[in-house]
Amino acid sequence: EKSRDEIEERIASVRQQQGGARRALDRYFAAFEEGSLSPSDCQERIGLLKDHIEALEAEERQLAQETPYEPSEAISADEAAQWAEFLPDLLTAGSAQQRKALMRKLIKEIRVMSRDDIVPTYRIPPLVRAVSGSVGPAGLEPATDAL
């Protein structure tokens, strides 16, 4: 089960790898055209790079077709509150690597404005989102004068 963000991150990584392989191919072709490499010197490496690019393109196509897991039903506010009670225990339990992985799942972005002003943006899983029609026109956020 992969989230949409994980799939998009992997596609971006695959595209970056494709770009690197294509640049390497271009360097081999340029060296060949300059006469600094003979065909026998670069033939095997060029074949490997082309195979690698084809494999990356196939992986990109497969990732583009993957449908991220979307839960079929929303949980209640009481259930979400029960999960929230366990959060401090989850953040202090387990290894540093496990805690770091949990934080990656919970936090979408961290903006550091200054040493005293750090603004996290949290991910809200679909299971915790408000059911359609259950939130009034004002929304979940408090009203502000700026809007």
Image (spheres, rainbow, N blue to C red):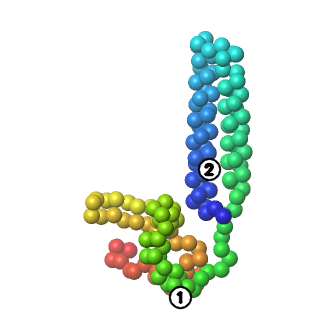
Give the label on residue 105, or none.
Answer: none
Q: Position of residue 82 (x, y in %)?
A: 51, 84
Locate the C terminus and report the quarter of the image it occupies: bottom left
Q: Is residue 137 above or below residue 32?
A: below
Q: Position of residue 85 (x, y in %)?
A: 47, 82
Q: Is residue 111 visible?
A: yes
Picture residue at 50% right of the left edge, 84% below the top: 81
| Three-letter code, disc 2 | Ile
Q: Is residue 33 visible?
A: no
Are there few (<14), some (14-19), or many (20+) residues within 10 Å of tag 2? many
Q: Which-is-in-front pick, marks 2 and 1?
A: 1
**Quarter of the view holding residue 48:** top right
Q: Position of residue 125 (x, y in %)?
A: 56, 72
Picture residue at 28% right of the left edge, 59% below the top: 114
- Spatial CA distance of label 2 from label 1 is 37 Å
Give the label on residue 11, or none.
Answer: 2
Q: Is residue 18 above or below residue 29?
A: below
The residue lying toward the viewer, choosing from 5 and 96, is 96
**Quarter of the view holding residue 54:** top right
| Three-letter code, disc 1 | Asp
* Left or right: 8 as drawn, with respect to 64: left
Q: Position of residue 7 (x, y in %)?
A: 62, 56
Picture residue at 38% right of the left edge, 60% below the top: 111
Residue highlighted by disc 1: 78
